Amino acid sequence: MVRPRQFAEGDLVLKAASHVMKGKPASKFAVKWEGPFVVKEANENGYYRLSEPDSDVLITPINVKWLKAYHP
């Protein structure tokens, strides 16, 4: 019973840190999530384009498995 994650444009999300995505070990106190980011583009194939809340500069596309919802 896994519910697929889907985000719409304008949603706030957190992105996994780069060391988590690469599977590299980090210190015990290293952050695992970065953000919040705003979803600017949502593709059907599970990739999203994000930007920082105060900017319109898009970062590289990221797969939905590296994102989670941000609840302020």
Image (tube, rainbow, N blue to C red):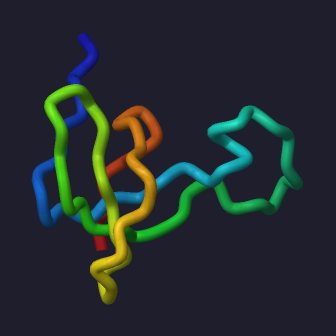
Q: Position of residue 30 (x, y in %)?
A: 77, 60
Residue at 24% x, 60% y is 39
Q: Position of residue 33 (x, y in %)?
A: 56, 57
Is 61 on the left or on the right of 20, as rendered? left
Q: Nearer the viewer, residue 1 or 20?
A: 20
Indicate whether 33 appears above or below 1: below
In the rendered image, the quadrant that contains the C terminus is bottom left
Is 5 on the left or on the right of 22, as rendered? left
In the rendered image, the quadrant that contains the N terminus is top left
User: Count the marks: how many?
Assistant: 0
Is 26 on the left or on the right of 38, as rendered? right
Instruction: Check the image and name the residue furthest to the bottom.
Output: 54
Residue at 35% x, 76% y is 57
Instruction: Check the image and name the residue furthest to the top.
Output: 1
- Residue 27's image quarter? bottom right
- Residue 65's image quarter? top left
Residue at 43% x, 62% y is 59
Q: Position of residue 10 (x, y in %)?
A: 14, 66
Indicate whether 55 appears above or below 35: below
Q: Position of residue 34 (x, y in %)?
A: 54, 64
- Residue 11's image quarter? bottom left
Residue at 18% x, 38% y is 43
Indicate whether 44 appears above or below 58: above
